[in-house]
Amino acid sequence: MTLFTADSPSQGHLSKMSFSDYSPRMKQSQIDLVRRFNRAVTQRIGALDDAYLSRGRSLGLSRLLWEIGPAGSEVRLLRARLGLDSGYFSRQLRRLEADRLVTTDPDDGDGRVRKVRLTRKGLAERAVLDSSSNELAASILTPLTEPQRDRLVTAMADVERLILASQVRVEIIDPRDIDARYCLRSYFEELGHRFDTGFDPAQSISASDEEMTLPNGLLLVANLLGAAVGCGALKLHIDTQIAEVKRMWVAADVRGLGLGRRLLERLSAEAASRGIVILRLETNRSLAEAKHLYERAGFVEVQPFNKEPYAHHWFQKDLRHE
């Protein structure tokens, strides 16, 4: 059963990849435009200044202070959210501690987890940053006409979502992994809410851990800034050159980023690379957006090929035509 509802790499990742790794997939003019955009934005917001917003610290250090937030944050999650190298992150955190803006201690509920919190001084400094950031944003909008402001903020919203999409990483992982468990649990819960009859995994055609582990199959998990946000699986039948797509799910807060299509394309590529010729899947009538996704991805509706009790539509795709 498959579910889908509509639709910048970290420093460490970039350091392992060269321009030649990317260039075959895009035009030089696109690369040039992104670089020009980056230069314009970094200069306009003052990212080049050592004392961002005249607060005596760099943009990176100010951003770390702001991201900690009034409620504090787990160190692990904070570093993942910002996509920072662990050594650099630790040095920046020590600087904030030296300025008595933050403290880092074991979490009250779990001593194994380290949590960073703003001090009273840190909370006051964050409030100043908020106020100064509002003034900077206003200074960008003020010279523009109202139609220009609308165009700019609309374009910014689009850019923000597309940059988020570019930061998603999709990898094959063990279905027993904690991120895999989270995605599969979320998938089951959503089907339970959306299906007219609810959803009981025990009544559905299986996709067990063993069936989602090579060589029997595989599980893809999408990760965004340290959080699991989607998954998709394959059950491989090498002897018949047929594979089944299972467990397609995308988190509600990242829908619209094209992640469902990306997962589906990656599953198709993984299947084809293992000699699979026919890719099959089924879906429920309550998932109209899933049906639309599969049709746009080149799947053709066919007669039922299994006895999945929760399915109303069956699809397949001939990978030889890719």
Image (cartoon, rainbow, N blue to C red):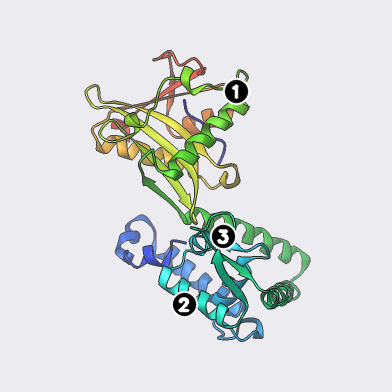
Q: Residues within 10 Å of mark 3 (few under 14, many from 20)?
A: some
Secondary structure beneath disc 2?
helix
Disc 3 residue type (three-letter):
Asp
What is the secondary structure assignment of the residue under circle 3?
Answer: loop
Residue 300 vs residue 177, the one in the foreground: 177
Q: Name the residue carrying label 3.
A: 107
Mark 1–mark 2 distance (CA, rounded to whole Å) = 50 Å
x%, y% of residue 271?
Answer: 30, 35
Q: Position of residue 230 (x, y in %)?
A: 48, 42
In the picture provided, is 181 more to the left or to the right than 61?
A: left
Mark 1 — residue? 195
- In percent of the image, x 78 and y 65: which residue is there? 146
Q: Taking 287 as reference, is 107 above or below it?
A: below
Q: CA distance from mark 2 to mark 3?
A: 21 Å
Q: Which mark is residue 91?
A: 2
Q: Amino acid at mark 1?
A: Phe
Residue in the foreground of this view, choosing between 37 and 231 = 231
Give the number of the disc on residue 152: none
Query: Which residue corresponds to the image point at 34% horizontal and 68% vertical from the top-left?
Result: 15
**Element at label 1:** loop
Residue 115 point in image, percent of width and height: 56, 63
Q: Quadrant of residue 319?
A: top left
Q: Residue at x 47, y 71 (%)?
A: 89
The mark lying in front, picked from 1 and 3, is 3
The answer for how far apart the CA atoms under marks 1 and 3 are is 39 Å
